[in-house]
Image (cartoon, rainbow, N blue to C red):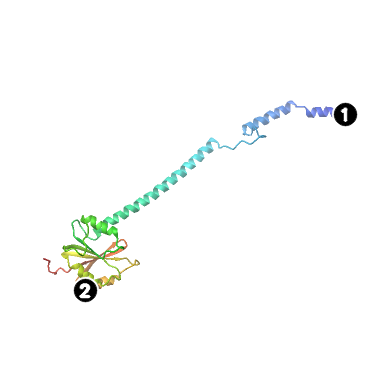
Amino acid sequence: MSGTRRVAVRRFGRRTSSSRRFSGIRADFLEVFGFVGLRESFRPCSLSPIDRRTLDRHQGQQHLAEGFADAAADRTEEDTTVVAAADAQNYAQKLGITPEMVVQELGWDEDTDDDIRSAVEETIGGEMVDEESDEVMDVVLLWWRDGDGDLVDALMDAIGPLSDDGFVWVLTPKTGQPGHVEPSEIAESAPTAGLTQTSAANLGMWSGSRLVQPKARAPKR
């Protein structure tokens, strides 16, 4: 029995050709699938060339989308600036102001719209004159707010230096803005001052009412 056990032990412990073949196959399998050196450590997983191209394509699409978004944001900001500049240039046109007109400004304060003022002065090629001027005026811009006083008196002062064909613009804050003036106040005050309202203009945060003199008014000397 002991001999049998020794033979069994020898046969079990011997490295047969079949076991060597299995070891070789196992090594080839591990090498093919990237597990060589499995006992020591695992190899880090790496992307195949196809997966790498797919990832690069997705990243490129993401960068392209981000570029389009940035360009759209810049374009929107640029368009907004262009529209604002165009509106500012149109203020003088809406007010019927042309180059070389003499324009008087009354009622200026810190809340007046500088875009409107700049557009007018750029069109006439100089600064607007104030109430101290003794020139004959083509246009009078009267900034007017609720609480500024008696509008009839202000209009009477405005038409004093006005030319025969001249006109007055009463500029008031829009509805909802501090100092808003009801349109009815202008409609009632104009005839009392000898003026007629002919049109209105939308001027940003301000509204304009155009008032003209009766045609029968005696010419100035």
Which residue was labeled with disc 1?
2
Q: Quadrant of residue 207?
A: bottom left
Mark 2: secondary structure: helix
Which residue was labeled with disc 2?
192
Q: Which of the marked residues, 1 or 2, is nearer the chain's N terminus?
A: 1
Name the image quarter holding the N terminus: top right
Q: Depth check: give the residue in front, 32 or 219.
A: 219
**Percent x, y for residue 13?**
78, 29
Mark 1: secondary structure: helix
Q: Residue furthest top?
A: 17
**What is the crowding at mark 1: few (fewer than 14 residues within 10 Å), some, or many (at least 20)?**
few
Name the image quarter holding the C terminus: bottom left
Q: Residue furthest left?
A: 221
**Percent x, y for residue 131?**
21, 65
**Percent x, y for residue 217?**
14, 69
Front: mark 1 or 2: 2
Question: For the point 84% across and 28% down, which residue is it?
Answer: 6
Q: Amino acid at mark 1?
A: Ser
Question: For the point 22% across and 72% down, which residue is it?
Answer: 153
**What is the crowding at mark 2: few (fewer than 14 residues within 10 Å), some, or many (at least 20)?**
some
Examine the rendered structure and indicate whether residue 62 appears above or below residue 123: above
Q: Depth check: give the residue in front, 45 or 146.
A: 146
Mark drawn on residue 130: none
